[in-house]
Amino acid sequence: AQKVTQAQTEISVVEKEDVTLDCVYETRDTTYYLFWYKQPPSGELVFLIRRNSFDEQNEISGRYSWNFQKSTSSFNFTITASQVVDSAVYFCALYEETSGSRLTFGEGTQLTVNP
Amino acid sequence: DAEITQSPRHKITETGRQVTLACHQTWNHNNMFWYRQDLGHGLRLIHYSYGVQDTNKGEVSDGYSVSRSNTEDLPLTLESAASSQTSVYFCASSESEDPRRTQYFGPGTRLTVL
């Protein structure tokens, strides 16, 4: 079974639209961490955010916001007023205490923001 | 500025050849990781290391090996390259033995095995 599911393979929006990228995870650990990474067309992986399982507060950073809900095992990522530069593949990842040092990644969501 | 570099950035090789991909970080991080990225699979862990002389197998380690002789470098070797190993390879590092520390990634190496 997939531990990290990003059901949206591709999303296409027009600039200035808001867009939400979904991430659903599966774990039996009580202590775990969730991450979002961005991979722009240049290919590098850029860390965006880390959230631990004991902190369900939503977080906002500029146009980015994250909604962590343990009840639904989701850690969704919203971009407000999207811009062309937001076009990238976005990965959600899970770290579990019992996994050694492994980060388990979702398959990624390709976001295209059209002008 | 501290950074993590990979070389080469692109490599084409033939089936059966030995290939080594380099990873070098200047953050003095203890933890280093190798992943491969393939369509439909996201990133999968190949090998990782918590420090000098320490190496561990990840999810997809068959056909790959690593060695850690110093803090800065974790080279990845494909002993006998196969077409199934055509992929983009990413090296990452993190600050301490606690892997809750964020992993920072190199720019990637695109490997093609013909």
Image (cartoon, coloured by chain):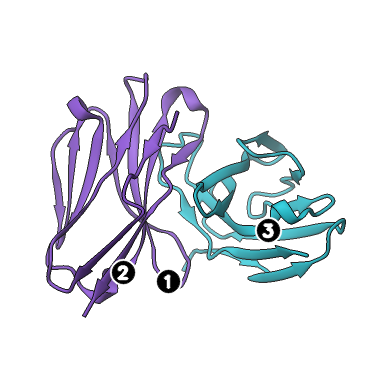
Chain colours: A purple, B cyan
Q: In the rendered structure, the residue with mark 3 lies on which chain?
A: B
Q: Given contact means CB atoms under 8 Å apart, are the residues at marks 1 and 2 in contact? A: yes
Query: Residue flagged by tag 1: what amino acid is it?
Result: Pro
* Total number of numbered discs in the rendering: 3
Residue A24 placement (x, y as % from top left): 30, 36
Query: Residue flagged by tag 3: what amino acid is it?
Result: Thr
Q: Nearer the viewer, residue B2 or A51?
A: A51
Q: What residue is at 23 percent from the left and 27 percent from the top? A: A54
Q: Could you tell me how far apart the alpha carbons at marks 2 and 3 are, in whole angstroms?
A: 25 Å
Is the residue A102 above or below the residue B24 in the image? Answer: above
Q: Which residue is mark 3?
A: B86
Residue neighbourhood size for the residue with mark 1, other residues' Cα within 10 Å, grouped as few (<14), some (14–19), many (≥20):
few
Position of the C terminus of chain A, as image quadrant, is bottom left
Q: Which residue is mark 1?
A: A41
Q: Which residue is mark 2?
A: A87
Q: Inspect this view and state whether residue B75 appears.
A: no
Q: Nearer the viewer, residue A48 or B40?
A: B40
Mark 1 vs mark 2: which is more N-terminal?
1
Q: Secondary structure at mark 2?
A: loop
Residue neighbourhood size for the residue with mark 2, other residues' Cα within 10 Å, grouped as few (<14), some (14–19), many (≥20):
many
Q: In the rendered structure, the residue with mark 1 lies on which chain?
A: A
User: In the image, A19: left or right of B51?
Assistant: left
Q: Given contact means CB atoms under 8 Å apart, are the residues at marks 2 and 3 in contact? A: no
Q: Secondary structure at mark 1?
A: loop
Is the residue B10 above or below the residue B35 in the image? Answer: below
Residue neighbourhood size for the residue with mark 3, other residues' Cα within 10 Å, grouped as few (<14), some (14–19), many (≥20):
some
Query: Which residue appears farthest toward the right when viewing the image?
Result: B16
Position of the N terminus of chain A, as image quadrant, is top left
Residue B11 placement (x, y as % from top left): 71, 69
